[in-house]
Image (cartoon, rainbow, N blue to C red):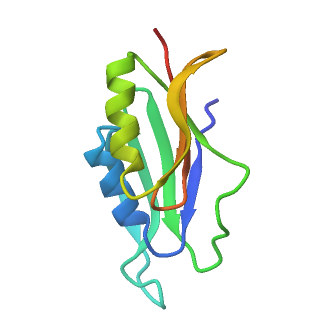
Amino acid sequence: MQAAPYLFFTTDAEPALEHYARCGLGKTVEINRHATGELRGKIMHARFEGPGVAFFASDNTDAEPMRGFAMFVIVESRPRMDELFAALGEGGVVTTPVGVQPWGYYGKLTDRFGVQWMMMASA
C-alpha cells in the first residue's frame, strides 16, 4: 500500500506541474485530458513523479482552495533546500522563512498555485 497526495486545481494544474518540474521535483509521467465540456483540454488526471516524490493532480470546476494541507518535503541538504524553497516560492508567499527551528532547518510557503509546502533539511 502507498498513500499519495492528490492536488485539485480549478484550471491551472498544467502550469503548476510544469513549475514543479522546473523546480527539480520530478516530471509528469501520465496525463489524461478532459475531452468535452468547459474543461476540454484541461487535466482530468495526471501523475507526477521524481526521486522520493509522487503525487497526482487534476483540474476540477468544484475544486476547493487547499487548506489544512501541506506538501512536506525532506531535502537532503541545506543548500538544496534553499534552492528548492526559492524556486517553489517564486510568485508565492513565504509564511515561515527558512531558518533553524527547534526541530531543524525548516521553512514554509504557499506557492502561486495555492499549494502549501513545508520543507526541512535532513542534515
Residue 60 appears left or right of 21: right
In terms of depth relative to the viewer, which is nearer, 11 or 107?
Answer: 107
Residue drawn 64% across the image and 29% down it: 1
Residue drawn 65% across the image and 15% down it: 103
Q: Locate residue 75, reporting x and y percent.
A: 43, 22
Task: Single out the residue that lies furthest toward the right.
Answer: 68
Q: Locate residue 98, reporting x and y percent.
A: 49, 30
Task: Single out the residue that lies furthest toward the left.
Answer: 22
Residue drawn 43% across the image and 50% down it: 47
Task: Single out the residue that lies furthest toward the top.
Answer: 123
Residue 32 appears left or right of 120: left
Q: Locate residue 5, reporting x and y percent.
A: 59, 45
**Relative to 20, is 45 above or below?**
below
**Relative to 91, is 77 above or below?**
above
Regarding residue 51, the answer to whether it shows in the image is no
In terms of depth relative to the viewer, which is nearer, 119 or 55?
Answer: 119
Regarding residue 40, the answer to whether it shows in the image is yes
In terms of depth relative to the viewer, which is nearer, 67 or 10?
Answer: 67
Q: Locate residue 46, reporting x and y percent.
A: 43, 57
Q: How many marks?
A: 0
Residue drawn 30% across the image and 43% down it: 23
